[in-house]
Amino acid sequence: MNELKNKVTQLLNDKAIDVFIGYGQGSADRIRAIFVRTAEQAGNLIFNASCTQNLAGYLLKHEVKHLGKLGILANTAALRSMMQLASEFQIRDSEVLVLFVNPDGSLTEFSSFISIETFLGSTDTGITADEKSRIEKLEAMTVKERWEFWNTEFEKCIKCYACRAACPMCYCHRCTTDVNQPQWIPVASHERGNLDYHLMRAMHLAGRCVNCGECANACPMDIPLNLLTYQLIEPIKADFGATAGMKADAMYALSTFKPEDKENFII
Amino acid sequence: MEKELKKLKYSDLSKLIERFGSQGYAVLAPVHKGKIVEIEAVQSLDAIALDVLLSTQSAKKAAFPKVEKVLEYTLEKAGVKQQAIDPGAYGETILFGVRPCDASGFKSLDAIFGEAPGDQFYLRKKEKTTIISFSCPTADEYCFCTSVGGGPGNTEGSDLQITAISKEELLVEILTEKGKKVSSLFADLLTDAGEVDKAKFLADVKVVFELDSVVQKTTSSFNNMELWLDQSLRCIGCGACAFVCPTCACFDFQDEQNTKKGVRLRLWDSCGFSLFTLHTSGHNPREVQSQRWRQRLMHKFSYMPEQLKVVGCEGCGRCSRACPVDMNVKEHLTSIGQLTI
Amino acid sequence: MPRIGVFVCHCGENISATVNCEKVAKISSELKGVEFSTDYKYMCSDPGQTMLKEAIKEHKLDGVVVAACSPRMHEPTFRKACAEAGLNPYLCEMSNIREHCSWVHPKDDLTTEKAEDLVRVMVEKVKKNKPLNSIKVPVTKTALVIGGGVAGIQAALDIANCGHKVIMVEKQPSIGGHMSQLSETFPTLDCSQCILTPRMVEIAQHPNITLFTYAEVEKVDGFIGNFKVTIRKKSKSLDEHLCTGCGLCTTKCPQKKIPNEFERGLGYRPAIYVPFPQAVPNKPVIDRENCTYYIKGKCKVCEIVCPTKAIRFDQEDEIVEVDAGAIVLATGFDVLQPDFFPEYGYGKYKDVIDGLQFERLASASGPTLGEIRRPSDGQIPKKIVFVACAGSRDPAKGIEYCSKICCMYTAKHAMLYKHKVHDGTPYVFYMDIRAGGKMYEEFVRRAIVEDETHYIRGRVSTIYEKNGKLIVKGADTLMGAQPIEIEADMVVLATAGVASKGAEALAQTVHVSYDSYKFFAEAHPKLKPVETNTAGIFLAGACQAPKDIPESVAAASGAAVKVAALFSNSELTREPLVAVVNRQAPPVFSSCVGCFLCQSVCPYLAIEREEIKNRNGEVIKTLAKVNEGLCQGCGTCVALCRTKAIDIHGYSNQQVYTEVMALLNE
Amino acid sequence: MQEFEPKIVAFVCNWCTYAGADLTGTSRIKYSANVKIIRFPCTGRIDFMILMKAFENGADGIIVSGCHPNDCHYSTGNFHARRRWIVFRNLLNFTGIDTERIQFSWVSAAEGFKWADVVNNTVARINEMGPYENYSKIAVSTLLNEEVDSNE
């Protein structure tokens, strides 16, 4: 951890960066994002097993960007988010200084997107066994049961949009939900509005979701939103050979095609 | 009215719920929903989560639901034909097992919706709602009710308050006429309490800041953008804090219609959203999140005390618990309290 | 408040027979925003259109819905009428209550209700329509003609003679197509070569025509007025500028026994060859599959004998890119392959041949120099059986259509045979004789009466060989299906005309639709017979369906006129139904976030990057921008856009959303 | 009660299926009147959200039809659409929306008969399945006279 603190201190002193986005101690046993702008603030940096939040979303936050040159402590999910954001022209190469803490505690600095791509190439980026089994449990249900399941979940939704705000891929300034001509998605957080919103969001993240789980973690009503997008990851990989957030110049699964794409339902 | 102190056997508690039901009261109470606790209609005591610290959402939805129909209309050749909704078309409701901060939270809402001419949709519902709160035997690090003038046994806003004084016995404080009326439904189960030191049974919540100074320093910090930016850098601009808050009263009107008919709905809204203040022109007076965060605190700790003579916070800490990025209001207020101006 | 006018057409009886048009008009009049509503016998007629125009003026309509036939039929008609009445044409929509309603449903309430629904949908849609102005795009005044048969030749000459450039692409070494293989043509019996070759030469010499033989179209991009075409010129292993066409090489080539395609395998050719004496261009190509040098690596006799040293063994295919404003498809037809008729022994018995082979036998320049001799032993056949409808009109064979030309050429064949072999006897098995056309019926009569051809109505069941004779078994359905057996010396099958090989692939390359037989599909069976559904691409000749020479030539001239009309202006006005990225006041500028996923789905590269700069010239936002000259309005980008920043005129989000709303909420 | 007349919306491409349906008409082939066509420039234009709207507003079934692969008038629209539908069907199925109620098909301008078949088969299937209630139940809740407040 000291290596991290020293590195960031040095980067700040060398004016290599103006602010470093990392983890600090939060309320009770929580971890929170901190924005280190001075050498002494660097002392607040921590890193441990609970530092799982995907900080990549902050790279696009207006006020954070305006602090100057950014450095970030990225976990695997954050690295993938950055690749996906790059492929969608939201961040540019070598615009951000990226640090990564290896399992042995040592630091890796990623100088370019290429180096990140190479690293990701040899990293497990799949969803967890637990998440897999939850999806399989749902898939084992009948259509009707699944409908009931999601309806009860979506009923809880209060449309606070924490899922959207927490998702690094939900960077649109004007989300479809905010479009009112026509009002595609009802603003109200009644069952219809909620179902529409979550289906729309899942579709818009299909092929873009890097399974960081921020949406589900953010939800104050404990809705397992991540499953919606997670269950699309495998099919999209199988059907189109595409995985989000692995390459900075990757083509989006739904804006490309192969003439030989297979399906079994179009007559 | 003069407060009355009674005792009730814990074992009789379930009878209350049954009687309320049989007397045509709808009973809303905290209910376990997986990891969260919702406030919902219940039929029996065992459905109620009396053990929980706090429900995930506040009790405000009893009188200020997240979606509320205020108007219906049909689009006819001649023009739009409206059908008004009767704001009074709600049954008597008992809000049961909520915490003192939920009950006292209504005083902010009363102040806001009560301003002339008065918001009938809120007022008529509130009118028909009797609040039976349970004082707090425990608290967590997010609680700071005592710093904003409340407390674990605060009776403000409650019609009845119940405190567990032993495994078998409950202290029942009858606080209002409304409370009296409801208590008459189980008068036969009540015995005189005599002298009880209620404080013994309450959680210990430390005072962490001095309210008046926080109010005054908040007010004078309007232009201290460095402060607001510092506090809100990690804020991602969702509405979680506002939607779980017992005193947040901002709402939006939305028409939902097809080509034939429509309804006008009142929906919760949040000053944390960038869209909240976006003008049609594209101009946004609160362009960045720090301004929105400032607005949130200013509204609760400066504008409301100034204009409505009430602080817009009960110290329940829900906003901090719900926040995806650990924005901790108690901590922020404390630091404001420590400002030297 | 909108002022919509609804006009319900009876289409004579076509709609009113099953739909209660008065009721539809009445119900529509009760819709919000409908100012005027009526029904009329023929909306597209002059009085109908006049009524429409007057109603627009009288009731100050700001939107029009015409409930009639398919918009693919009359949308332009009514939009034009609206324009003439001073209403923006794009404020006019059509409800398709004929093709999609009255013609497909019985006469009952449901049908009328459906018509009402369809009208209501368009009334709601038109409320969301915006006035649009058509887009002007430049036109490249060069036509690409694919196929150098008689149709392609005719189209090319007509266009060239209007003063426009033409590029002709022919995949064979010479133009001429099937017509150059024919001996004499019905009903005049004039020599096919004699009338065609002058036209072929004209093509070669026309200053406005560039000819690419031995070449194929590989890729077509762009759109009407602005096609970008990639052509592959297959290597002829020859420097055409040096070659004088003396033909010495073809006489010296050691490979002499290669079956001659032009002669339909009845004759032979060398490996370096000119397909036929009158070929244009009259210069040889090397058939690399069969050339000794390319097979064994040595020979080069042609190179040695060539007086101008024009042979180029190492020559490679050449890729040429050309711009064209219009494309004429004239790729013609093929005849059924031999294996199609096991029961007729085609391919098994040398003396069972097809019509085209007979043409070669009868042709003065053919393998027998015009003498009818059977392929097996060169004997002159005394009895020939002609089998009409060999494959055609035969659902069992999967060809249900009539190949149309067979009746006539079979009669011609019988006649030619009789003229050349006076003591011979021609038999014709036929199903019906279809001789519609100027002098056609008379022609067939002559074959029967003057040339004593025995016409037998019935199908041939089987043909087999028995001591040197071909036994043809069939039945005469006019004699009570009495079985008939003929000992013939030779059998000629009038094989069905089918879509040319590679027609499907070509259709996909140029993006035109085709029917289930792989013939190219016209835009409208009656009113747009030479147009395709793809603007700027036209059809000439038998690539559309089997046609005889006059028909092919007529179609070709028709296509040529369409091209000439397109080229009559330097700009063409296009429908403004294109995508557009929304723009707002600063600091928002647009709801586009610049993810450019739209760019990757656009097949026309119509999405560009637009950088928004502040006063100091720093880029503060990068937005997508649609080049409306390139956009063809498929709208794929619209469906993909997460911020709904990109939308498309005519099928906007507002419009389609409202249509669904209106359709489902009576 | 009167018998069930399914509401089916067809979202079709202008260049193939719409023209194919025109051909069905010109050929006077009969099919059920329950299906009503909404015209799009290309299947590529058909936003998955418009299908959601159709269900919400009471459609019992949906038909989406365009050009056969390689035949797209705009050369690639149907390929993009195909991927979209593959993913969308996955999602619908996972969220418990019965994909049996959406029929996807390729119907060319020459396939008038096929269009009639697609329609009739779909109508028959939807008739068997009955009205689509579980979606419309929530879909129209706010438009009916029942309370939408989450507390009663």
Image (cartoon, coloured by chain):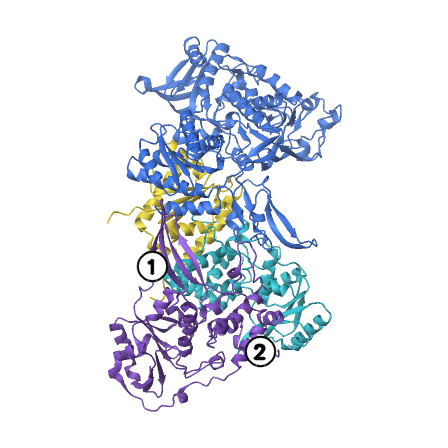
Chain under numbered label 2 = B
Tell me the residue that label 1 is attached to.
Answer: B85
- On the image, the x and y values in percent for residue C613 come to 66, 52
Which color is chain A depicted in? Answer: cyan
First reached walking from the N terminus: tag 2 or tag 1:
1
Q: Distance between the residues labelled 2 and 1?
A: 46 Å
Q: In this view, does C165 lie above or below C439?
A: below
Of residue C228 and residue B68, the one placed in the foreground of this image is: B68
Of residue A169 and residue C475, the one placed in the foreground of this image is: A169
Based on the displayed image, in which of its 4 quarters is residue C63 positioned? top left
Q: For residue A50, say whether it is visible.
A: no
Q: In this view, does B166 lie to the left or right of B210?
A: left
Please name the amino acid that badge 1 sits on.
Ile
Q: In this view, does C565 lie to the left or right of C253?
A: left
SS state under label 2: helix
Residue B335: assigned label: 2
Labelled pair 2, 1 in contact (Cβ < 8 Å): no
Please name the amino acid that badge 2 sits on.
Ser
Image quarter in which the C terminus of chain D is found: bottom left
Q: For residue A27, say whether it is visible.
A: yes
Of residue B66 and residue A235, the one placed in the foreground of this image is: B66
Q: The blue chain is which one?
A: C
Chain under numbered label 1 = B
| Residue farthest along the bottom direction in this orientation | B195
SS state under label 1: loop
- On the image, the x and y values in percent for residue B297 come to 53, 71
Which color is chain B depicted in? Answer: purple
- On the image, the x and y values in percent for residue B108 come to 44, 72
| Residue located 59% across and 33% down the image | C225
Tell if the residue under mark 2 belongs to the same chain as the one under mark 1.
Answer: yes
- On the image, the x and y values in percent for residue B325 come to 54, 70
Q: The yellow chain is which one?
A: D
